[in-house]
Image (cartoon, rainbow, N blue to C red):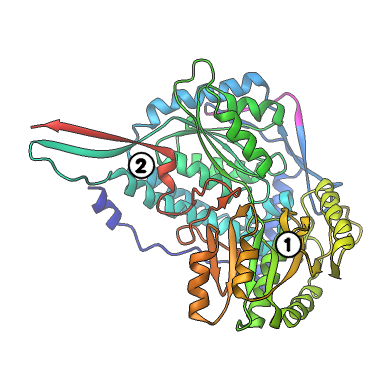
Amino acid sequence: MTSTLMEGFLPFEHEPYFPFSREDVAQAQREAYRRVRERYVGRTFPMSLGGERVEGGETFEVRNPADTREVVWRFPKATPEQLERAVACAKTAFETWRFSDPMQRATIFKRAGELLRGRRMEFNAVMGLENGKNWAEADGEVAECVDHFEVFARETLKWAQGKPVYPMPDEHVTTVYEPIGVVAVISPWNFPAAIPLGMALGAIAAGNTVVWKPASETPLSSLLLVELLFEAGLPQGVIQFITGTDEVLGDPLVDHRDVRMIAFTGSKEIGCRIMERAARVQPGQRWLKRVMAEMGGKDPTVVCADADLDAAATGIVQAAFGYAGQKCSACSRVIAEEDVYDALLEKVVSLAREIRVGSPEENAPLGPVIHEGSARRIMGYIENGKKTARLVLGGERAGSGEREGGYVQPTIFADVDPKDPLFQEEIFGPVLTFTRARDWRHAIDLANDSEYGLTAAFYSRDPAKIEGARRLMHVGNLYINRKCTGALSGTHAFGGYGMSGTNAKVGGPDYLFWFLQTKTVAQKY
């Protein structure tokens, strides 16, 4: 039956991006910003616990990264009692949702995708005001959310079919997959819609319930998606949306005995802390907790002597400086063969020099980093790098008129030693390094010299070198002759090796397995 229902779906197609080069489309996005400012700025938004809007009490401010003087909206600081209520509500809702019809779940996701298509520009504007993405970067993420709804609708039905087993002559044997319980979704600020939505949909599609904790910098981008799911028909008890401080919603949420799994995206430091704490069995806890973690990257681009240097330079600049380098998949290391090193460096510097710094609301190519603390941390790397490598572009704070924000110039260092922190540590800002390699195999060795293993790009025209890169480069997502950012849900299953995380591969064919447990049932004839 499920197979028949799957056949009723239209072929999957990725959601197209808006062509902002057209003036009518650009004007529509400007209008969306105006409406968002009229409708949302200055408001205090609620949490959602057990299907009820929870307001009142102490709140925290969300500031516009493009001008940190502006408070755009406020959200509640949850109390320990509200955390207990959130987990209890999710636990109660699980007893019903676990038995929900997979087709019901898929239908809700499909309906949510349609609703989001009609509100994409609104969601783009909210995201731009919360985390400083320009129009194209925000639209790429919101379009990915539409793809998530479509992909998870299909994956829901696929996993509901179970798997065939080798037959027995006197038994009927099935292998089926069942949900596991309450899943805590802990998400970052850099992809405040697509990342938590992917984790939450994985949980919900499998029949689990969710405690959704967004990053405090970007809660509205998450809340709007939760409300969209409710509007599409999701029972409101299935998701508990809770906001606040790490003191209340950090370790206590991870440690809670009734939380069955933690789905996390964020820093290596916090991911490792979650892994360690989740391994402890709490009093009254009846399972070993699962942890799914994506913890960043230090992503290389390898350029061989036979590569198309113009294509490589374009891909490098897009991947290094898109969203100010604040992507876990951003290119932060270029490793080029000696014969083309200087020519490639010149091309990349020339392209990066043309990048305009400004407000994301006005669609500037390079906006601010998320806040002043991040800008100071990035500048610390840059100042130290000036002592150990050759600065060829940038290296200073950038101004943006009268606005106050974490603006940093596009910065490029050349001749960076592989042991330098610039080469080894995730900077999470608009900083790019160049390192020489003797040959293409040496370049791959340098690329693999990292505790991370999320994404990488490899540029070459030689089939033998490309085959070597496929076998030897130790990353979860390898891109040949294209940039190392821009994974598409349903096509580029995303997740890395090593300290980049648990390799769960969101948007891929195996993702739901993380949220399920396997049951074999044998019935004798």
Magenta range is 51-59
Local SS, label 1: loop
**Cα–Cα span, label 1 and label 2:** 52 Å
Residue sitting nearer the eye, 510 or 224: 510
In the rendered structure, which amino acid carries the disc numbered 1? Pro
User: Could you say whether the residue bearing mark 2 is in a helix, strand or loop?
Assistant: helix
| Residue in the image at 63% along x and 70% along y | 442
**Residue 249 in sight here:** yes
**Is 57 part of what is drawn in magenta?**
yes
Name the spot of residue 430 as percent of width and height, x first.
77, 61
Seen at 71% across and 39% down, the residue is 216
Q: Find disc 2 in the rendering and name its residue.
A: 104
Which is more N-terminal, label 2 or label 1? 2
The residue that mark 1 highlights is: 418
Q: Is residue 365 visible?
A: no
Magenta stretch: includes residue 331: no
Instruction: Give neighbour class at mark 2: few <14, some 14-19, many 20+ (Cα, 10 Å).
Output: some
In front: 470, or 309?
470
In front of the other: 461 or 400? 461
In the image, residue 358 above or below residue 231: below
Tell me where residue 313 appears, x and y as whole percent: 68, 77
Query: For the point 87% across and 56% down, which residue is it?
Result: 384
Q: Quadrant of residue 461?
A: bottom right
Left or right, 251 with respect to 178, comes to right
